[in-house]
Image (tube, helix red, strand yellow):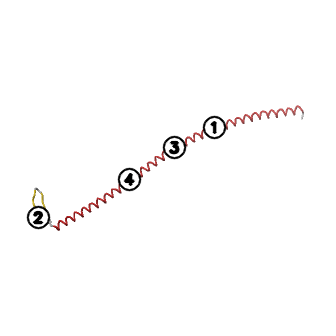
Amino acid sequence: MTQNTAQNDDQVVFALTEEEMEEWDERERRWQEETRLRREEQRMEAEERRQERGDWHSDMLRRQRVWEQQKEEREINREQWEQRMEEEGRKCEERSEATRKKEKEEKEKNDVTDHYSFKWEEWREKEKLFLGK
């Protein structure tokens, strides 16, 4: 670079040869191209990070939705199970009551039958004694 300079209101002006100008332009083009490539690479990396974050975030949101859905299903299943248990309890109680009632009726019937058969046996014994057999 030549040192041909001129002072003009606090500005230093360098006079460049044609070859130096071309060299300078070439350096500037390379610098701009490198800068453009570097920015493009940074943009792509940022996009990848954003995508990864987005994938992670969407994955976490999906997991949360699945967990909430499963929680609702567990709650519904628990309520249905409780209803079934209550219903089974009622049925069991009804069966127990019916069984107790049936057993009581059978016992009363057997008691009556036993009473009459005892009376019948007693009468036959008296008849045997009376008839002398």
Picture coordinates of residue 26, whole percent (x, y): 22, 65
Q: CA distance from mark 2 to mark 1?
A: 116 Å
**Mark 1 or mark 4: whose residue is earlier in sequence:** 4
Categorize mark 1 by other alpha carbons within 10 Å: few (<14), some (14-19), many (20+): few
Which numbered marker is on residue 29? none
Q: Residue at the location (11% across, 64% down)? A: 4
Disc 2 vs disc 1: which is toward the camera? 2
Q: Are marks 1 and 4 in contact (CB under 8 Å)?
A: no
Which amino acid does the dot numbered 4 rest on? Gly
* Image quadrant containing the C terminus: top right
Q: CA distance from mark 4 to mark 2?
A: 57 Å
Q: Residue at the location (16% across, 67% down)? A: 18
Which amino acid does the dot numbered 3 rest on? Ile
User: Label 2, on which residue?
Assistant: 4
Query: Looking at the rendering, which quadrant does residue 132 occupy?
Result: top right
User: Label 4, on which residue?
Assistant: 54
User: Label 3, on which residue?
Assistant: 76
Residue at disc 1, secondary structure: helix
**Mark 4 or mark 2: whose residue is earlier in sequence:** 2
**Mark 4 or mark 3: whose residue is earlier in sequence:** 4
Picture coordinates of residue 17, whole percent (x, y): 15, 67
Residue at disc 2, secondary structure: loop
Residue most toward the bottom?
A: 19
**Mark 2 or mark 3: whose residue is earlier in sequence:** 2
Q: Are marks 4 and 2 in contact (CB under 8 Å)?
A: no
Residue at disc 3, secondary structure: helix
Categorize mark 3 by other alpha carbons within 10 Å: few (<14), some (14-19), many (20+): few
Query: Looking at the rendering, which quadrant does residue 101 occupy?
Result: top right
Disc 3 vs disc 1: which is toward the camera? 3
Categorize mark 2 by other alpha carbons within 10 Å: few (<14), some (14-19), many (20+): few
